[in-house]
Amino acid sequence: NTCQDLKETYQDFGLPYFHILDSAMQCRNSVGCRVHGDVLVSKVGGNVHVALGKSTVRDGKHVHEFNLKDVSDGFNTSHIIHRLEFGERVPGVESPLEGTAKIVLKGAYMFHYYIKLVPTLFERDDGKSQYTHQYSVTGQEKDVLVRQGELAGLPGVFLVYEFTPFMVQKSVKEVPFSHFLISVCAIIGGVFTV
């Protein structure tokens, strides 16, 4: 019996299985979904999310369809963000969300990460330039399981991004050795003056 077999059996009987994932021996070492890929977006704000249910469009609106019985006692939205970048990876540019881990032990959580993207042009000393985005992030989390069988939101992980209206240009230039010598002379001259 695997963890998946146990989940399917619970589903066949119309029972929620969220509460057994931590206690069942078959499910203790199981790994959840692993989401990876590239998303091309327009240069306007929006969001990318991984959430409960089947994604459909109804009356021009994006909705998620699911059976409320499946989440009557919770929905696990635990996640680890291993890598998240907006554009090409550039050495020396930090990615604040990398390594973020959120573990849900009970309930049904909705995680929002509000991301401010700053377009950045890196000019290297060899004359080549590289276009990417730096970002800052703030987060919010909320248990949307009000009581058994009642949700006050959609459980999932939401990356809400917004572009800033300005661009940063960074240049890498080596300082010549003569600059160092002049600085040393200025320090020595200042010491003798005092």
Image (cartoon, helix red, strand yellow):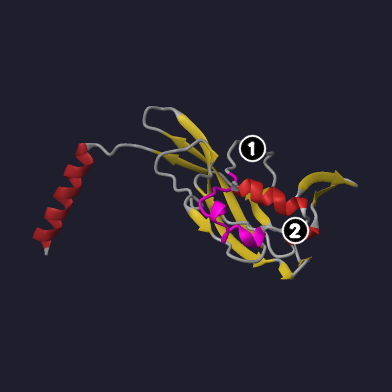
Displayed quadrant of residue 151: bottom right
For the residue marked with disc 1, what is the amino acid? Val
Q: Which of the numbered marks, if any, corresponds to residue 15?
A: 2
Q: Residues within 10 Å of mark 1 (few under 14, many from 20)?
A: few
| Image spot of residue 86 (x, y percent) | 56, 41
Residues under labels 2 and 1: Cα distance?
35 Å
| Residue 110 in view, yes or no | no
From the top left corner, tell me how far across and down residue 186 is, in percent: 17, 51
Q: Residue furthest front?
A: 1
Which residue is found at the position 48% from the left and 48% from the top?
Answer: 95
The stretch in magenta equals: 18-33
Mark 2 or 1: the one toward you: 2
Say the numbered circle drawn on residue 39: 1
Instruction: Tell me the amino acid under the disc marked 2.
Output: Leu
Q: Nearer the viewer, residue 183 or 91?
A: 91
- Residue 73, horizontal then vertical, whole percent: 70, 65
- SS class, disc 2: loop
Q: Crowdedness of circle 2 by 10 Å Cα count: few (<14), some, many (20+)?
A: some
Residue 144 horizontal side relative to residue 182, left or right: right
The question of residue 96 being in magenta is answered with no
Q: Quadrant of residue 42?
A: top right
Q: Is residue 65 left or right of residue 173?
A: right
Above or below for 169 versus 157: above
Residue 45: x %, y % from top left: 69, 48
Q: Residue at x 70, y 44 (%)?
A: 44
